[in-house]
Amino acid sequence: MGNKLAGKVAVITGGNSGIGLATAKLFQTEGATVVITGRRQEAVNSAVKEIEGSSIGFVSDAGNMTDIQALYENIHTKIGKIDVLFLNAGVATFGPFTSMDEATFDQMVNVNFKGLFFNVQKALPYLNEGASVVFNSSIADQKGFPATNVYAATKAAVRSLARTLAGELFEHKIRVNSIAPGPIDTPIFDKLGFPEGASGEIKEGFAKENPMKRMGTSEEIAKAALFLASDDSSYIMGIDLTVDGGMTQL
Ligand code: NAP
């Protein structure tokens, strides 16, 4: 138990799985009241149980404008103002450029970029002075991994937004940064659009290519999120904190 987020309210979108769930647990042990979102009531309920403490969950689609607007009004009514906003919800479908269809394109843009953009805009009236906004981008915003065409572009947009919003929101004393995870072992690898059972091979490939010869863990990203969310990073804004076992550097 620490106290880096004592008395703070932290909202984590996509908090019922993978990186979001690990971050919710860490923020809770650091003293925050944690609010998570997800699209499925059952998954949100079971995550809230796992997180423990005074956590609370909302079913809210991070790519749906009506849901986004309602979410921050509901949070304000039930809990109050927000100190940490970790915009983590994201979807990934990988595949060749030539066969990428419009619906898949739209879904990734809606959740990963448009939704994230409007989450910040709709949350803004409910953010406390001194709040920290953290985006979950990806090292796909820095490297041209095969078959990541649309996904990588959405993450590059997120990275760009961390810079521009850092400048725009600082007048409200709000810091904005992003985290760029390398390959992290989460359920997202079962949702990439490849045949069932292919995720093992994909993960092995990423681990082999990584200078540390392994994938990262959700907990390792959670620690980076805690750093950016807390006062430990008080003189940092507009960065894309890369946590990738050296994959973009070596
Ligand atoms: P994950 O285990 O699949 O978690 C994704 C979370 O986002 C789930 O809780 C999911 O909830 C939620 N979500 C998806 N679409 C949503 C929507 N429209 N509205 C609300 N919630 C939604 O994957 P993860 O690896 O932890 O991914 C988290 C973030 O990290 C993503 O933005 C991803 O792009 C990024 N990232 C991951 C990696 C990696 O290697 N794992 C690397 C770089 C970046 P549902 O249960 O409702 O789907």
Image: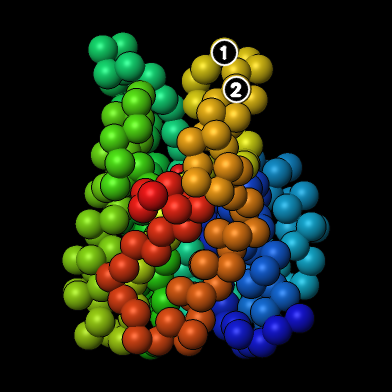
Judge whether 149 appears above or below 30 on screen: above
Q: Provide the secondary structure element on which disc 1 rests.
A: loop
Q: x and y percent of residue 204 in the render?
A: 60, 29
Q: Are marks 1 and 2 in contact (CB under 8 Å)?
A: no
Judge whether 213 appears above or below 103 on screen: below
Q: Provide the secondary structure element on which disc 2 rests.
A: helix
How many neighbours does mark 2 have within 10 angstroms: few (below 14), some (14-19), or many (20 or more)? Answer: few
Q: Which mark is residue 195?
A: 1
Task: Tell me what residue is drawn at x 40 percent, y 87 percent.
Answer: 234
Foreground mark, 1 or 2, reads 2
Q: Which one is in front, 203 or 64?
A: 203
Task: Tell me what residue is drawn at x 70 percent, y 65 percent.
Answer: 25
Q: Which mark is residue 201?
A: 2
Q: x and y percent of residue 210 in the render?
A: 50, 42
Q: Amino acid at mark 2?
A: Glu
How many neighbours does mark 1 have within 10 angstroms: few (below 14), some (14-19), or many (20 or more)? Answer: few
Q: Which mark is residue 110?
A: none
Q: Which one is in front, 48 or 243?
A: 243
The answer to whether residue 190 is seen in the rendering is no
Using the numbered discs, state the Cα–Cα distance from disc 1 to disc 2 in whole angstroms. 11 Å
Q: Amino acid at mark 1?
A: Pro
**Horizontal arrangement in the rendering, residue 168 relative to residue 205 (left or right):** left
Task: Tell me what residue is drawn at x 28 percent, y 70 percent.
Answer: 238
Tally of marks: 2
The answer to whether residue 100 is seen in the rendering is yes
Task: Tell me what residue is drawn at x 34 percent, y 62 percent.
Answer: 240
Q: Quadrant of residue 166?
A: bottom left
Does the beta carbon of the residue at mark 2 sit less than 8 Å from ligand 1? Answer: no
Q: x and y percent of residue 160 in the render?
A: 22, 57
Q: Earlier in the sequence, mark 1 or mark 2?
A: 1
Q: Which one is in front, 49 or 65?
A: 49
